[in-house]
Image (tube, grey):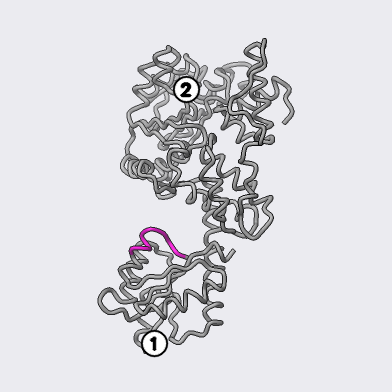
């Protein structure tokens, strides 16, 4: 676990900083150094470190206390250790009052440093595990939860902050697995509707009749089996956000009903005569080209323009490869906590495999690959052989061979069967490759009686 954590040592005396850094590296930590407070703050802007060791006296710029104050503005939970050769009671009190976790005196006792860092790391692990658990349970993501170095993704994160408190509809477009629902949740939980409901609706998972009752609810006796009144998703989302996943799969009649709700902000339950008014923000997502669907007559143009007030297009992972190391390490941390395993590093060879792979399933496929590698890993870190399943088999063909004289259904069955074999039965990965919803894939597996 130690290799995962990074520590920053800040001292204007190079010999001192390198000496402390060398000791910590020998203990298994990744360590960077900074020669001034200004350099330390600049590094902290790029990333948060598990611990900051900062010299109190650094002439020619911000001292240790000032540097710590600036770092804690960037990272309020930063664990800062102030060290000095000129210890006084007053400086110790000042350092602790300003937020230092520890105050130590040069020359260092290496064993004391080791125990101190170990204690800080244990606290960090607990804090991170709790934060991940809360995120997993509530899924209350915000704009800052979108990890990226890509300029386009940073623009999206800024756009989320700008539009979060508006009521305008938003259309999120991107391939399967790019994180469309993450963006939708970030819009909701970054804005002033954060304390209100976020209601997701999978348009591909339900039949037209079920989807209508799910959206608008029904009155008692409206149809056979309607034993009691039921509120629909729009009512449940009142004051908050309703999120339509795969909006391109919504049937034509419901397209018209949805357009009416967007225009009037009201609807009727099935079998009801009372008009129900709601304050709901609508966010929709699709992996299909809706403009092409409009031109083909499969999607209403007036509904498209109503939804596309704010257009967000998420680039595929293959177009933002600079994010792969960041996302892979975040996935290691998140999944290791969930599996109850040590957080490990990703070796250079393994990272090259990840960077060279095409990622047809995008971020979702990357997380699945990391989870599999963590479960089957052989050593103390993830290495190239742990991701061997991402390499094509030696006899794989560059093209896909379609057997002759097959019907369209037989071709579909063959495509699903081959994809399931290549994903080794992983439904998430197979659905991402086939560019369909998981519920649709399950339905087709049952229909064609395919082995998992």
Q: Which residue is mark 1?
A: 85
For label 1, the crowd category at 10 Å Cα-Cα, with few meaning under 14, some 14 to 19 and many 20 or more, is few
Foreground mark, 2 or 1, reads 1
Up/down of 117 relative to 280, above or below: below
In the rendered structure, are the residues bearing label 2 and label 1 in contact, judged by CB atoms less than 8 Å apart? no
For label 2, the crowd category at 10 Å Cα-Cα, with few meaning under 14, some 14 to 19 and many 20 or more, is many
Q: Which residue is mark 2?
A: 248
| SS state under label 1 | loop
Residue 449 horizontal/vertical position (percent): 73, 22
The residue located at (39%, 45%) in the rendering is: 150
- Locate residue 153 relative to residue 431 in the image: left or right: left
- Magenta segment range? 42-49
Residue 28 horizontal/vertical position (percent): 56, 69
Q: Quadrant of the C terminus?
A: top right
Q: Which mark is residue 259?
A: none
Identify the image quadrant of residue 303. top left
Identify the image quadrant of residue 56. bottom left
- Locate residue 427 relative to residue 313 in the image: left or right: right
- Locate residue 319 relative to residue 433 in the image: left or right: left
Badge 2 or badge 1: first in the primary sequence? 1
> From this viewpoint, is residue 119 visible?
no
Residue 265 horizontal/vertical position (percent): 37, 25
Identify the image quadrant of residue 191. top left
Whole-angstrom CA distance, mark 2 to mark 1, is 66 Å
* Nearer the observer, 115 or 404: 404
Up/down of 360 relative to 403, above or below: below
Q: Quadrant of the N terminus?
A: bottom right
* Nearer the observer, 15 or 235: 15
């Amino acid at each position: 676990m130690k290799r995962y954590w990074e520590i920053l040592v800040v001292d204007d005396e190079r010999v001192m900083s390198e000496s402390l850094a060398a000791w910590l590296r020998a203990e298994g930590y990744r360590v960077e150094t900074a020669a001034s407070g200004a350099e330390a703050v600049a590094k902290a802007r790029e990333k948060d470190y598990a611990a900051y060791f900062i010299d109190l006296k650094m002439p020619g710029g911000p001292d240790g206390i000032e540097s710590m104050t600036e770092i804690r503005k960037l990272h309020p939970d930063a664990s800062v250790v102030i060290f000095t050769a000129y210890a006084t009671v007053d400086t110790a009190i000042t350092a602790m009052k300003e937020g230092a976790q520890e105050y130590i005196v040069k020359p260092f006792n290496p064993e004391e440093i080791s125990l101190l860092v170990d204690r800080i790391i244990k606290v960090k692990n607990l804090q991170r595990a709790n934060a991940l658990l809360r995120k997993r349970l509530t899924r209350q993501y915000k704009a800052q939860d979108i990890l990226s170095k890509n300029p386009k993704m940073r623009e999206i994160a800024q756009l989320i902050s700008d539009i979060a408190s508006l009521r305008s509809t938003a259309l999120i477009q991107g391939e399967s697995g790019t994180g469309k629902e993450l963006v939708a949740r970030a819009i909701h939980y970054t804005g002033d509707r954060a304390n209100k409901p976020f209601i997701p609706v999978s348009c591909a998972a339900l039949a037209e009749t079920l989807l209508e009752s799910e959206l608008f609810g029904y009155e008692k006796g409206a149809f056979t089996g309607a034993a009691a009144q039921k509120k629909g998703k729009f009512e449940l989302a009142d004051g908050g956000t309703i999120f339509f996943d795969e909006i391109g799969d919504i049937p034509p009649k419901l397209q018209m009903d949805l357009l009416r709700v967007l225009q009037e902000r009201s609807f009727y339950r099935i079998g009801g005569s009372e008009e129900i008014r709601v304050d709901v923000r609508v966010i929709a997502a699709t992996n299909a080209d809706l403009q092409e669907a409009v031109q083909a007559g499969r999607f209403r143009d007036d509904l498209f323009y109503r939804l596309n007030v704010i257009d967000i297009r998420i680039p595929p992972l293959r177009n933002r490869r600079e994010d792969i190391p960041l996302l892979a390490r975040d996935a290691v941390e998140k999944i290791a906590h969930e599996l109850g395993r040590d957080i490990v590093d990703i070796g250079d060879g393994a990272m090259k495999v990840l960077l060279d792979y095409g990622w047809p399933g995008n971020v979702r496929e990357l997380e699945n690959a990391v989870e599999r590698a963590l479960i089957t890993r052989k050593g103390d870190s993830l290495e190239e052989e742990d991701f061997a399943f991402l390499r094509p088999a030696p006899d794989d063909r560059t093209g896909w061979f379609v057997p002759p004289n097959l019907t369209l259904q037989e071709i579909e069955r063959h495509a699903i069967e081959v994809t399931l074999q290549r994903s080794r039965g992983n439904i998430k990965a197979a659905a991402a490759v086939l560019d369909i919803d998981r519920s649709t894939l399950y339905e087709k597996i049952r229909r064609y009686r395919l082995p998992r």
